[in-house]
Image: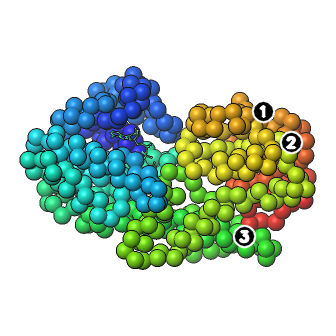
Amino acid sequence: MGLVTGTCFAETGNDVTCVDIDAGKISKLTNGEITIYEPGLEKLFLRNLKENRLHFTTSLSEGIKEASIIFLALPTPPGEDGSADLKYILGVSDELGRLLTDYKVIVDKSTVPVGTAEKVKAAIAKNCTVEFDVVSNPEFLREGVAVEDFMKPDRVVIGTTSERAKKLMGDLYAPFVRQGNPVIYMDERSAELTKYAANSFLAVKISFMNEIARLCEKLGADVDMVRRGIGSDERIGKRFLFPGIGYGGSCFPKDVQALAKSSAEVDYEFEILNAVMRVNEEQKLHLIPGIKQYFNNDLKGKRFALWGLAFKPNTDDIREAPALYMIDALTAAGATVCAFDPEGMKNVKATIGDKIEYAGNQYEALAGADALIIATEWNEFRTPDFARITNSLKNKAIFDGRNLFDLAAMKELGFYYQSVGRATIK
Ligand SMILES: NC(=O)c1ccc[n+]([C@@H]2O[C@H](COP(=O)([O-])OP(=O)(O)OC[C@H]3O[C@@H](n4cnc5c(N)ncnc54)[C@H](O)[C@@H]3O)[C@@H](O)[C@H]2O)c1
């Protein structure tokens, strides 16, 4: 999030210095090597690096020296009890307090619980002699379309009660909202809650559809039809109604958990969120019983081709990816897995190493496999060469966690085809 934010602010002519404690990352970025896969980012990154508007350093004092606005894009991972761990945010705030020599705006861009702006303010104020403001400016970009989202946000939320900070932030964001999308000013607490409310609502929408999909399977309905039937109602909307094998990534799981935890801390049980977390845990393994059933409950020695590792397409992010949960379940049952993902394999290799095999392309993964499993809806998986799939697999069986294929077509091709919320083609 920090790299996208920094690059996009440089793109509108600002001078940006990105600070990170990871010296390896900083050295790569300084040398023009991008450290994440995000469509469109590399071009902007290289252009702004060349134009000398984008700089990288491991030194916080050097990074903030000339800055008028300092964005905190630090991790806020779940702590042991599920609440957001603020040690990175407050640690850096503490350091900042010692370093500030003139007025600056410090912006919480990380997703942080209600009340964090006040904590950041207190941590800075402890050692600080100059004036400063703390603003809550949550980020709504989606991985995979992060640059597009950042350059043309649906809205910008700015939480501050300081007129001085409001003016600086408004000027900074003006080039991004020229089409008229709103910059919504509010107090810090409301801004902090807005981000959690947005992600939690989307997680509710996904999980609701996943439950409808389960019901479809039991009742003999087709979730694709139901999805279209309800999505054309403007109050519901067409987006985010696709069932699948659960949400993953670095945001939804941790943010839903953190909001549930924040609620519990003020003696409020957020019942819907508790249900969403349960539903999503189960959904990640939704395909497994069907796979086991197909192989007469014995996966020992079976080999699976797995298409997709990233938690969603167009990213190399594998944090909380449903594919990893499936890998655990399959290997625990004695099966082997050969996976292919266009961008996610490097990160998976670094995490689970040779627990699975990695293929050079999607067809290579099929060689000698007993069946194909699809975990991520990369576009290149949507219209595959079914003849090659048929020739490579031992059984003509596909277990599709993302509903990529048409049921009638699969029937005609003669596949055993299990998807989510639709009839299994046998
Ligand atoms: N990833 C997204 O799509 C997204 C979208 C919106 C909001 N967010 C929020 O943004 C925040 C960051 O998420 P991310 O996915 O970019 O995390 P990330 O882990 O990819 O990046 C965080 C970076 O902070 C660096 N860091 C850690 N401690 C530091 C320190 N003391 N000084 C300087 N740098 C330090 C890490 O080395 C890392 O490079 C989280 O709160 C997340 O919820 C993320």
Query: Residue at left 68%, top 72%?
Result: 212
First reached walking from the N terminus: tag 2 or tag 1: 2
Query: Residue at left 31%, top 35%?
Result: 19
Could you tell me how far apart the alpha carbons at marks 2 and 1 are, in whole angstroms? 19 Å
Hey, which quadrant is residue 410 in on the image?
Answer: bottom right
Disc 2, disc 3: CB below 8 Å?
no
For mark 2, what is the residue?
Answer: 301
Q: Does the closest atom of ligand 1 sit within 8 Å of the Cβ of label 1?
A: no
Residue 354 in the image: above or below residue 246: above
> Quadrant where the C terminus lies?
bottom right
Of badges 2 and 3, nearer the viewer stands: 2
- Looking at the rendered structure, the secondary structure element under dot 2 is loop
Query: As drawn, is 233 to the left or to the right of 99?
Result: right
First reached walking from the N terminus: tag 2 or tag 3: 3
Category of crowding for the residue at label 3, using alpha-carbon neighbours closer than 10 angstroms: few (below 14), some (14–19), many (at least 20):
some
For mark 3, what is the residue?
Answer: 214
Query: As drawn, is 210 to the left or to the right of 133?
Result: right
Under mark 2, the amino acid is: Gly
Rendering coords of residue 45 (x, y %): 39, 32
Disc 1, disc 3: CB below 8 Å?
no
Q: Residue furthest front?
A: 80
For mark 1, what is the residue?
Answer: 364
Rendering coords of residue 387 (x, y %): 87, 40
Under mark 3, the amino acid is: Arg
Category of crowding for the residue at label 2, using alpha-carbon neighbours closer than 10 angstroms: few (below 14), some (14–19), many (at least 20):
few
Under mark 1, the amino acid is: Glu
Category of crowding for the residue at label 1, using alpha-carbon neighbours closer than 10 angstroms: few (below 14), some (14–19), many (at least 20):
some
